[in-house]
Amino acid sequence: MKIVLGRKQKYTSDELWHDAVAHIEQLISADECETFAAAAINRITDAAAGKNAGYAWSGGKDSLVLADLCQRAGVTQSALFLTKLEFPAFESWLLENKPDGCEVLRFDFDLDYLAAHPELIFPKGKAMQRWNVVMQRRSQITYYRKRNLEILLTGHRRIDGNGCGKEGFTRRKSGETIYAPLYDWPHEAVLGYIHYHGIPMPPIYNWPRGYRNGTHFWPYRSCDSRADGWREVYQIDPSVVEVAAGKLPEAKAFLEGVRS
């Protein structure tokens, strides 16, 4: 295996990602991918043994691999968490391609919420951390309790800056046990597994800075500036900004600038 991709957010451009995808067979072999897969399946089997287990599915590259491995390991229940702030094309893809046994849970984060909390549009620093708490953690807790889970599997990996732990962790206050069986996978193994198993990829990775932003709903996009954020969202789907302009003055001002 040859490592060419680094930490997603800080060091790796989308050009490098696309080049790695195009030349993935030169970076990692099918046998090397299966070695990673076998280890992850063993982890899933051990972690879920005798427990009511489920996994979180976002439709991103990591969760595509996780879903395939969980199915192979016998864990078949999962959840997809959606807001009212998704890109329409991505939401359609998710609903058409979600794995068997995947439950859709919808949350009421909408334009009214953004109008009341404009600091959460293209957030940085503490505002980004707040999104993680109000959306990711809330969605995981909701699914965990709804299905009386004893363990929730995620596609988090350390190379993306996620705190995974080799043995997972249990949240002190809310009590969920979270385990990330792909925690030590390099990007090349993820891309290789998708390639060799012919797993369809969502459209987001062909959008501007798609690999950097991944599966997140549109206000969560990581951008150099708010102007860049609106420009990227408009480039991906102008209708998103047009609808947002009815509630968000910033979106309205952007549209006026585009049309002037």
Image (spheres, rainbow, N blue to C red):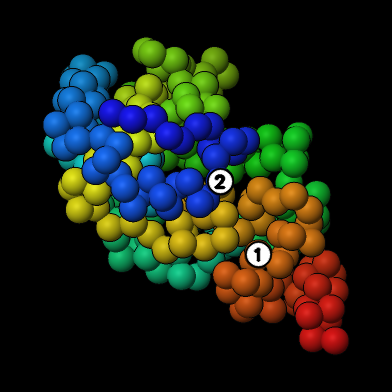
Tell me where residue 46 appears, x and y as whole percent.
21, 17
Would you say 180 lies left or right of 52 here? right
Point out the image quarter for the N terminus: top left
Q: Nearer the viewer, residue 258 or 63?
A: 258
Q: Amino acid at mark 1?
A: Glu
SS for dot 2: loop
Question: Which residue is depicted at the point 69% across and 79% down?
Answer: 242
Number of marks in picture: 2
Is 168 above or below relative to 61? above
**Residue at image coords 75%, 35%:** 125
> What crowding class fits label 2: few (fewer than 14 Cα within 10 Å), some (14-19), or many (20 or more)?
some
Q: Earlier in the sequence, mark 2 or mark 1?
A: 2
Residue for point 75% across, 41% down: 124
Tell me the tag on residue 232: 1
Position of residue 163 in the picture relative to residue 97 (left or right): right
The answer, for residue 9, to whether it is visible in the render is yes
